[in-house]
Image (cartoon, rainbow, N blue to C red):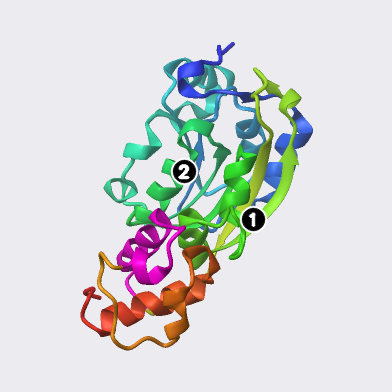
Amino acid sequence: MVRPKKKLGQHFLKDQNIARKIVDLFTAFGDPELLLEIGPGTGVLTRLLLEKKLCRFLAADVDSESIAFLKQEFPAHGDKFVLQDFLAWAPQKEGVKRLAVIGNFPYNISSQIFFHILEMDAEVTEVVCMLQREVARRIASGPGTRDYGILSVLLQSRYEVKYAFTVDEHVFDPPPKVKSGVIRLELHMGKTLPCAFANLQKVVKQAFNMRRKTLRNALKGLGIPKQLPEPKWLDMRAEQLHVSEFEQLTACYEREGILKP
């Protein structure tokens, strides 16, 4: 059996009903080129996924003990388990252009996982995952709330985000000190951003890094466009702007030549 390792932030799900609810949220079976499970651990989700009619499937973990256990537990699928840090994984090197992601994300790197998803060259069509409830709520939150932040805007600009359900501590080994949340992200198919995504990142990060200031002061470092669709935005704080307004604001920076499209 695999020993949960504190340094890896491992909390192994042991409730089969919760595992099935997570897998049932996933809809992209057979659609993308690859379904990637992040952090399979003891294989509670993996077992259910292998029962499905999958496209190419890989389960990636940084824990060699977990990979060895899974290869022994599922001998017919040994080639599907890889010792790989997702944060260092480059899908284009394997010729993958379209994938979906599922997993019980390690709480200590869940935000980093999402930033990596946003920065990958490949298109991630769907994400179903469990992570710390506070982070899950932050990702799914809307403007005007304390939880609304950088990941909220950037992920919602690309995905339809749904907070699915909360998971109690006792269904894990060892039990975490916080509750968990399960969320589903589905790519906005056919959506075209009015600005470069890299520029949207710059504007959003600058705005939320000084979230207590109005945008007039928070965005001084980038420069202020002379022409704004809504001048009132400058007197608002980052948490008050909708995702679409951040996109329009960034497009304005590009039209004014402050940021290159």
Mark identifier at residue 27: 1
Closer to the camera in the image, 8 or 239 = 239
Q: Which is nearer the N-term, disc 2 or disc 1?
A: 1
Q: Quadrant of residue 240?
A: bottom right
Q: Which residue is found at the position 54% from the left and 30% from the top?
A: 40
- Determine whether 8 is above or below 18 in the image: above
Q: Which residue is found at the position 62% from the left and 59% from the top?
A: 145
Q: Residue under circle 2?
A: 111
Badge nearest the viewer, 2 or 1: 2
- What percent of the width, then of the height, locates residue 114? 45, 48
Dominant secondary structure of the magenta stretch? helix
Tell me if residue 106 can be seen: no
Closer to the camera in the image, 252 or 41 = 252
Q: For the C terminus, which image quadrant?
A: bottom left
Badge 2 marks a residue whose secondary structure is helix
Q: CA distance from mark 2 to mark 1?
A: 23 Å
Residue range of the region highlighted in magenta in the rendering: 195-219
